[in-house]
Image (cartoon, rainbow, N blue to C red):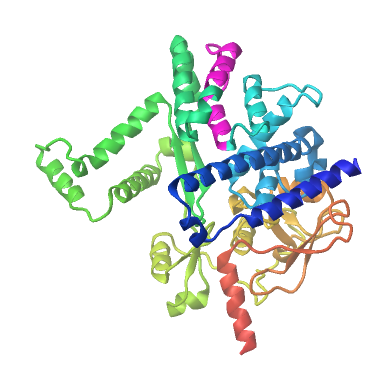
């Protein structure tokens, strides 16, 4: 085994050396002829496919060592991550989508490997895709295009039909890019589904969703995947909103004509106009507070919380922070939101702590949860991006074990996964002196993760609190 490990390590070192020898100078590349330039691009693409194959094998092994039945003893879980995809993303510095592709395709490569014991597969028709990736003949993006385009098995689409489709797509793959391969896979799936229109309609209905993902700037992006009927409704709403801007029907009614003229002359772009209009429609519907709206969203109305220091608000200087976002907003925006919703003052001391309430409360109160959300900004564990509303309040001095108090200084926000991890795998959290970027909490890993148990900083996710701590620090230094 050491010999295999040494060979693998030396191979990786050789790859790094070879990669560093490839010219990256614009002047060198500019000196190539057209044929040599395109040949170089193809050669690098071939090399990338080979490296992707190795990366997928490693990601598949990470997934295997993090499989669900291992619980908190899994590799990803021991390292503090909910899923192998999150661990791969952290390790590679890639996007969530790229990490997910590596893990999914890597798992297929493992299942297709004849040298390891056979394992059950939920997607047996894709084993040939795993084999093609392992051989370096198929890139990860193309493999994911086949997987996504064909979809899963159903009552009207058999394993044999999907297996034949995979072979057709693998034969096509060397001649087209991943986008064309996905389109072709989707077209094949549509053709297979013609025999089961009702089942296809039901499947699309079950796949309906509105998903929220994070954009690179920290804000949310909502992806809408409607079913057939809802899609038609969304299309009709979109068409009616934008008709005056797209040369739609002529409006005979005087009021409609005035509305159409106003829309056509609006300075916002078409996309901006649709965004604002749909947001306003949601606000109007929720704001009615009728039994119908309460039956959908409950009695607690959605709200935008804006956090700002008292000094900044009084002096109309500095910035505010919308809870859940790292991006600052102007004091004018803060004042507008306050005008609409009022204020809830939360007092912090110079160390970034709010008022204590003593041990008589076992659970953190609603007002304490508001203060914790303002201070922590979400789950404090590592790079976790779970927002405050997805978190639980954790006593850093355990309630029963340490006779801890339900004080704000003794509580931190952790998402459910990391809350369970801290308790089950014996992580500890300590509070020390805060700084301009940290509220003073440190994460102590168990000996199984770090034998020396070196403390790790737990940065607050609340930019508003960072503003306050930095302001207090400047005041102490002057």
**Where are the magenta residues, as a range?**
141-169
Residue 196 location (% of width, % of height)? 47, 11
> Is residue 86 or residue 165 the one in the foreground?
165
Magenta stretch encompasses residue 155: yes
Q: Position of residue 59 (x, y in %)?
A: 71, 40
* Quadrant for the N terminus in the image: top right
- The secondary structure that dominates the magenta segment is helix
Question: Residue drawn at (59%, 70%), measured in percent from left and top?
Answer: 466
Residue at 27%, 54% (x, y): give it. Answer: 268
Q: Is residue 160 left or right of residue 457?
A: left
Residue 416 visible somewhere in the drawing: no
Q: Residue at x 63, y 57 (%)?
A: 369
Would residue 168 appear left or right of 421 to someone viewing this image?
left
Q: Quadrant of the C terminus?
A: bottom right
Q: Residue at x 56, y 21 (%)?
A: 166
- Please identify the quarter of the rendering in which residue 125 is found: top right
Q: Is residue 151 magenta?
A: yes
């Amino acid at each position: 085994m050491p010999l295999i490990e040494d060979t693998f390590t030396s191979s990786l070192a050789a790859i790094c050396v070879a990669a560093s020898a490839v010219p990256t100078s614009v002047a060198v590349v500019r000196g190539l002829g057209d044929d040599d330039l395109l040949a170089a691009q193809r050669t690098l693409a071939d090399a990338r496919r080979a490296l992707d194959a190795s990366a997928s094998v490693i990601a598949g092994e990470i997934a295997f060592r993090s499989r669900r039945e291992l619980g908190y003893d899994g590799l990803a879980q021991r390292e503090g991550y909910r899923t192998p995809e999150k661990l791969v993303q952290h390790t590679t510095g890639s996007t969530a989508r790229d990490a997910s592709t590596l893990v999914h395709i890597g798992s297929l490569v493992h299942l297709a490997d004849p040298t390891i014991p056979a394992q059950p597969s939920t997607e047996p028709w894709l084993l040939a895709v795993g084999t093609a990736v392992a051989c370096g003949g198929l890139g990860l993006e193309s493999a994911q295009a086949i997987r996504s385009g064909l979809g899963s098995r159903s009552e009207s689409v058999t394993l044999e039909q999907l297996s034949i489709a995979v072979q057709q797509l693998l034969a096509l793959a060397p001649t087209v890019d991943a986008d064309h391969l996905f389109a072709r896979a989707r077209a094949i799936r549509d053709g297979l589904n013609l025999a089961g229109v009702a089942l296809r309609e039901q499947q699309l209905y079950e796949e309906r969703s509105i998903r929220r993902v994070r954009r690179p700037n920290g804000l949310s992006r909502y992806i809408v995947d409607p079913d057939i009927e809802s899609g038609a409704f969304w299309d009709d709403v979109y068409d009616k909103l934008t008709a005056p801007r797209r040369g739609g029907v002529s409006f005979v009614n005087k009021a409609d004509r005035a509305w159409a003229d106003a829309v056509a002359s609006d300075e916002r772009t078409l996309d901006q106009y649709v965004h604002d209009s749909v947001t306003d429609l949601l606000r109007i519907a929720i704001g009615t507070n009728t039994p119908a709206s309460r039956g959908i969203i409950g009695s607690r109305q959605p709200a935008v919380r804006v956090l700002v220091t008292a000094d900044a608000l009084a002096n109309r200087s500095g910035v505010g922070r919308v809870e859940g976002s790292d991006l600052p907003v102007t004091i004018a925006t803060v004042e507008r939101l306050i005008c609409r919703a009022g204020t809830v003052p939360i007092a912090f001391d110079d160390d970034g702590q709010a008022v204590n309430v003593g041990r008589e409360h076992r659970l953190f109160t609603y007002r304490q949860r508001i203060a914790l959300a303002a201070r922590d900004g979400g789950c404090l564990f590592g790079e976790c991006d779970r927002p405050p509303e997805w978190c639980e309040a954790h006593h850093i001095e355990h309630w029963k074990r340490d006779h801890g108090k339900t004080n704000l200084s003794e509580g931190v926000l952790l998402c459910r996964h990391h809350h369970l991890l801290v308790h089950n795998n014996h992580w500890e959290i300590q509070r020390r002196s805060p700084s301009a970027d940290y509220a003073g909490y440190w994460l102590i890993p168990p000996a199984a993760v770090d034998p020396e148990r070196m403390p790790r900083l737990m940065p607050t996710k609340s930019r508003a609190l960072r503003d306050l701590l930095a302001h207090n620090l400047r005041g102490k230094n002057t």
